[in-house]
Amino acid sequence: MAKENIGAIGIDLGTFTSDIAIVERGSSELINLTKFPTLVDEGPESYMKRIVPVVNGMKNAYDGEICALGIGIPSWSGVEEAIMNSPNMKKFNGFKILGAFRLMLPWLEMKVVGDNDANVAGFAEEGYGNHHGAKEGIAGYTLGGGVGFYAFVLDPDTGKLFMLTGRKKRAGEGGHRAVPPPPGAPERKCGCGYQYCVEAGASANAVIFYAQHALSSGKPTLITEKVRQDVNYNERKSILTQVTPIHVEQAANDGDEAALQILDWLSWSLAHGIRGVIQDFDPVIFTISGGMSHWKGLIREIRKKLRTLDGVVPCREVKVVASTLENPGILGPAAMALYKFA
Ligand SMILES: [Zn+2]
């Protein structure tokens, strides 16, 4: 007898972790959410050897039928179906990840889809995000080790949304849009090599870099206390290697000067990036997702700065919101897989 429940497995391949879960048809709930260490420096062969048993285990434990697999992939070249020119996962460059999953998971019968990690997150925001006005244009950043970007742009003639992907389906890398560097911030190059990318000043790695700079300056900052209070704190290791954006957020919430300065730099890069997106694509909604999107002070500060930036398309008309989805990075590719194969 055929199983009643039908689900797809979604994987959000990130620089730090690959988050995996099952999503069922008609639902946005993530079943068996698992965080799997990507270990980018070990390369794709090790990655596949480690992740395939996890996917097989999920399939076997699921009370239903897994019909497909969807993956959100950074630095994705859709025509070559490979990771190309990745600034944060250099050993994965040239890796044809969809082909590898098709080969190593024969029970999926080739039903494996993938797209740029931010595009799939956009797919989830547009379909499940409950954003009023999204059908008239929605764009967003996904904040992680880098800055992912998606834009679903309205074509007023057809009333339909479309995505700009270019000749090799690799465009839409809006995290690498040039913005003026935050005034007074220590200089940081983006992983792609260019100095002025949004990602250079607005990723989790940028926040960690700024925090390390503040901690090394010798000036007292609450960021130190926040790292020490963390349950995962290891006193045998340097504080510099343990600081994360959460500690900066906590210190900023307590009014710490260094943390507020980092918030100012971070929101500067994001607001200027969003301003450019508004001039290019005229969206109704702009979503912020990823770990740092829970930082309420960050969203407030982006809105405040954006209101002061001039442009031909008025920035104040666009609604900047934090994603309310549990994990659009997994939901998106799983929903895309269900859409195609269920
Ligand atoms: Zn860049």
Image (cartoon, rainbow, N blue to C red):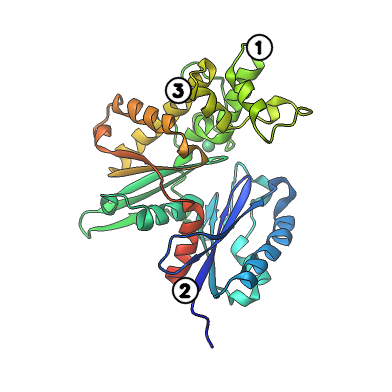
The residue identified by callout 3 is 264
**Residue 112 seen:** no
> How far separated are the C-alphas under marks 1 and 2?
57 Å
Q: Residues within 10 Å of mark 1 (few under 14, many from 20)?
A: few
Q: Quadrant of the C terminus?
A: bottom left
Q: Amino acid at mark 1?
A: Gly
Q: CA distance from mark 3 to mark 1?
A: 20 Å
The tag earlier along the polypeptide, 3 or 2, is 3
In terms of depth relative to the viewer, which is nearer, 108 or 166? Answer: 108
Visible residue check, residue 310: yes
- Residue at image location 68% in from the left, 26% down from the top: 240
Q: Amino acid at mark 2?
A: Phe
Determine the CA span between mark 3 and mark 2: 45 Å
Indicate the secondary structure of the residue bearing disc 3.
helix
Residue at figure coordinates x 43%, y 28% from the top left: 267
Residue sticking out furthest to the right: 236
The residue carrying mark 1 is 218
Frontmost of labels 1 and 2 is 1
For the residue pair 275 and 266, the one nearer the viewer reads as 266
Q: Is residue 63 left or right of residue 173?
A: right
| Disc 1 secondary structure class | loop
Q: Are marks 3 and 1 in contact (CB under 8 Å)?
A: no
